[in-house]
Image (spheres, rainbow, N blue to C red):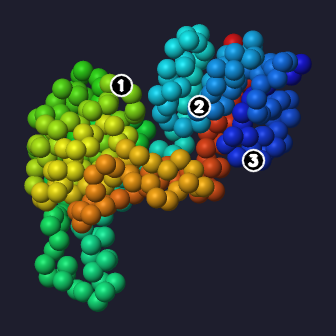
Amino acid sequence: MTDFWVHGLAGLDDNAPERLAARHPDWQFTDGPPTADAGYDVLVTGRPSHALLTASPRLRTLVVPFAGIPAETRALLADFPDLAVRTIHHNAGPTAELAVGLVLAAARAIVPADQAMRSGDWTPRFVPPNPTMILGDHRALVIGYGEVGRRVARGLAGLGMEVHAVRSSDRPALDGDVQIHPRSALAELVPRSRVVVLAVPASPSTDGLFNAALIAALPEPSVLVNMARATVVDEQALYERLSRGGVAAGLDVWWEEARSAGAATGIAASAYPFHTLPNVVLSPHRGGAFSLREVRDLRLSHVEAVLVRLSSPSAG
């Protein structure tokens, strides 16, 4: 019997098992429904079935090949308290890049200006769309200071912004030039921030975090960018606030989303017509850029690094 058996890797990429087998010939790879003789040590999937979690008596680790753990997986894992869970952050860089891009696009009204010029209209040069704003020497607030949040903070600091961040810790701290605050400081920080970026993980504690009161507290002008999950924000309150103008938004996550390329059209992202608002930049949940070959390769390399650690005798 192999000393290290991995199941589910083909779910990342059709040739992922072959690529890793060439570098790790002593590992065994399987995929698909579990068999009666299943003996894998590691399961690689973000949405495992109960059968996959119980088929192998050797299973000790679930590797979720992205940053967050889906709600249905979190609920299922409650029945497996001894199973170790590992996640990866391969797409933190691409996600942060898109977040900064959405900040800039929303702050400088790039989309309305582009649309006007396509019809020969130069009006945005002389009468800026509302809102249009500069960012340098103003305050930015990054809510969620993990792998993505730290990169976003560095990008905004590079634009000359004074960057503050909020994380779940109860204690204030300083990370270079970034001032870090506890979540209890949100009501004080939001009204003083020209840019607010949401980068918190999805969890019961973050659902509804950016509520109607915080949305109402956004100053004019300001930009809200959501790279977290749609459920972090009050949907109706956000639409109504954006409808009044003075605040712009860049949204990469939605309350309804396409789940596959085969069913990618005809899906309303929200119960409210955000698409009619000129002060909103709409992005179809592409922060992780998972369709790019280089991002898929990056994900495989991050998973491989986790597997190398798990295959070590010292991993137990």
> In the rendering, which numbered label is found on residue 283?
none
Closer mark to the observer between disc 3 and disc 2: 2
Instruction: Determine crowd level at label 3: few under 14, some 14-19, many 20+ residues with C-alpha closer than 10 A.
Output: few
Q: Earlier in the sequence, mark 1 or mark 3?
A: 3
Element type where label 2 sits in the image: loop
Q: What is the x, y in percent for residue 160? A: 23, 56
The residue sitting at 70% across, 46% down in the picture is 13
The amino acid type found where label 2 is placed reads: Arg
Of all residues, the one furthest to the bottom in this rendering is 120
Label total for image: 3
Quadrant location, the N terminus? top right
Element type where label 1 sits in the image: loop
Residue labelled with disc 3: 14
Q: What is the x, y in percent for residue 133? A: 17, 64
Q: CA distance from mark 3 to mark 2?
A: 18 Å
Residue labelled with disc 2: 47
Residue labelled with disc 1: 204
Relative to residue 86, is residue 143 drawn left or right? left
Residue sitting nearer the eye, 212 or 113: 212
Relative to residue 40, is residue 234 drawn left or right? left
Residue sitting nearer the eye, 157 or 228: 228
The residue sitting at 81% across, 20% down in the picture is 38
Q: What is the x, y in percent for residue 180? A: 25, 33
Q: Is the residue under label 1 in contact with that under label 2 (CB below 8 Å)?
A: no
Q: What is the x, y in percent for residue 112? A: 27, 72
Residue 314 shows up from this direction:
no
Q: Is residue 36 above or below residue 110?
A: above
Instruction: Determine crowd level at label 1: few under 14, some 14-19, many 20+ residues with C-alpha closer than 10 A.
Output: few
The amino acid type found where label 3 is placed reads: Asp
| Residue 283: quadrant of the picture | bottom left
